[in-house]
Image (spheres, rainbow, N blue to C red):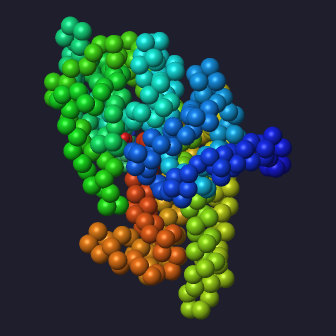
């Protein structure tokens, strides 16, 4: 097989690089981490992209997107990650956006799309509940119709970035007398509506991105229902099918590899550079080969998803398992490469000066946090066990 990119893709990549060099302020570069960038950075970055006409890089032209091909999207993501630009709001660009494009009314699009393109409204995803994660259809947050409103009561959990979000897309139970999947509806809710409480959950990486979100008699206008009442489950399946290539986080995997190579060629153990030590060199080579295989799988899955081909589900589940296990192994290898500094580079809130003066300090700071954060990658976006169940069912008819 010939993996040389064609000349138009090379030109596209150069155009993206030029834009990043010339049009993106220096203080919006070199920032990339596994978790989402702070709210102000996400908003500024979105405005800059929109001014360039790239406000929706993943969407078709008919929806105001760039209409880029899969290789172009991957090249764009790759270049942005290498430059260290902030992240976009993935919830809206990769999950909710396609849903709005497919199911929202013209009025709903008019209400939300300008703010999405302009970066003036950030979103969060309100699906999981205590007791309803993998078995999402068992969710219990209730929405009862009262005139022109739904009255919502219940609790969501693991709501990433709810404390930074202006709006939430929410799964609610609107009917308890039908099969559980048939009683679910999809609502858009303004986070400033009275009755919503967001409480932080601090995670193992010593950060606050997760929350519990409580709904206490929250009145939501009926015009915020997406699709029709009871259609929430099929909308959710549509939304989750767009998630596979995303959860692989390929640009970040490449970043981890670049960093690991730098560590291996700079740091020494017993007077020998890590890359010259056979055991570490073998580990590095294996990770590199796996990363290349993953890149091919990402391209394949992304193309199948774009063409709405059914094989994307099985391959997407395989990709989710392989990519997230890789995320865990490569970040562990990074911490290992840093040796004693691996643990020290983990910022200690009470001793901020602890990290001063160690080798590769700027690069190494936060590496251990990422390794801890990645422990969750085999859980969010559908656990590995659930993905294996999907593969067993779809591929082997078990
Ligand atoms: C960092 C992070 C961010 C998240 N962000 C969000 C968010 O923004 N919005 C949101 O709605 N949710 C979010 N989630 C929730 C996430 O989607 C759920 O954690 C996930 O779906 C698993 O559900 P659960 O935690 O309830 O575990 P459970 O479903 O209770 O699973 C517990 C264990 O049982 C196993 N298991 C469950 N069912 C099966 C089965 N059928 N076969 C085999 N094994 C099974 C699981 O693999 C797991 O090991 C986030 C989670 C994390 C960790």
From this viewpoint, is residue 130 visible?
no
Left or right, 273 with respect to 204, comes to right
> Is residue 220 placed above or below 247 in the rendered structure?
above
Residue for point 43% across, 23% down: 112
Residue 300's x, y, as percent? 67, 40
Left or right, 121 with respect to 97, comes to left
Residue 310's x, y, as percent? 60, 28
> Is residue 16 placed above or below 94 in the rendered structure?
below
Residue 119's x, y, as percent? 46, 35
Q: Which quadrant does ligand 1 occupy?
A: top left
Residue for point 43% across, 12% down: 107
From this viewpoint, is residue 183 visible?
yes
Q: Residue furthest bottom?
A: 271
Residue 148's x, y, as percent? 24, 9
Foreground residue, 256 or 18? 18
Image label count: 0
Left or right, 31 with respect to 124, comes to right
Residue for point 55% across, 56% down: 26
Residue for point 27% across, 15% down: 221
């Amino acid at each position: 097989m010939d993996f040389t990119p064609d000349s138009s893709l090379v030109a596209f990549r150069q155009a993206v690089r030029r834009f990043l060099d010339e049009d993106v302020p220096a203080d919006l570069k070199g920032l990339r981490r596994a978790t989402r960038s702070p709210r102000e950075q996400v908003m500024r970055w979105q405005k800059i992209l929109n001014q360039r006409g790239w406000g929706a890089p993943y969407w078709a032209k008919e929806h105001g997107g760039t209409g880029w091909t899969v290789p172009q999207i991957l090249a764009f993501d790759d270049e942005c990650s290498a430059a260290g630009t902030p992240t976009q709001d993935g919830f809206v660009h990769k999950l909710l956006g396609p849903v709005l494009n497919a199911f929202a009314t013209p009025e709903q699009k008019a209400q939300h799309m300008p703010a999405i393109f302009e970066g003036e409204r950030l979103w969060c995803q309100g699906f999981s509940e205590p007791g309803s994660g993998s078995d999402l259809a068992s969710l219990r947050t209730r929405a009862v119709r009262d005139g022109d409103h739904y009255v919502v009561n219940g609790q969501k959990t693991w709501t990433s970035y709810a404390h930074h979000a202006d709006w939430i897309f929410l799964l609610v139970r609107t009917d308890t007398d039908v099969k559980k999947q048939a009683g679910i509806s999809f609502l858009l809710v303004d986070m400033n509506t009275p009755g919503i409480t967001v409480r932080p959950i601090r995670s193992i990486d010593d950060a606050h991105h997760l929350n519990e979100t409580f709904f206490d008699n929250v009145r939501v206008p009926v015009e915020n229902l997406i699709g029709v009442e009871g259609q929430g489950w099929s909308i959710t399946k549509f939304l989750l099918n767009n998630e596979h290539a995303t959860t692989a986080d390929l640009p970040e995997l490449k970043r981890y590899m670049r960093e690991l190579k730098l560590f291996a060629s700079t740091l020494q153990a017993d007077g020998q550079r890590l890359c010259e030590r056979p055991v570490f060199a073998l580990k590095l080579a294996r990770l590199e080969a796996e990363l290349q295989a993953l890149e091919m799988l990402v391209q394949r899955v992304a193309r199948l998803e774009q063409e709405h081909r059914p094989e994307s589900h099985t391959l997407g589940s395989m990709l989710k398992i392989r990519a997230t296990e890789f995320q865990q192994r490569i970040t562990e290898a990074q911490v290992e490469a840093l040796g004693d500094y691996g643990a020290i580079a983990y910022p200690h809130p009470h001793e901020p000066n602890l990290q001063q003066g160690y080798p590769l300090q700027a690069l190494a700071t936060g590496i251990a946090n990422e390794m801890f954060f990645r422990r969750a990658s085999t859980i969010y976006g559908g656990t590995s066990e659930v993905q294996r169940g999907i593969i067993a069912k779809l591929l082997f008819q078990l």
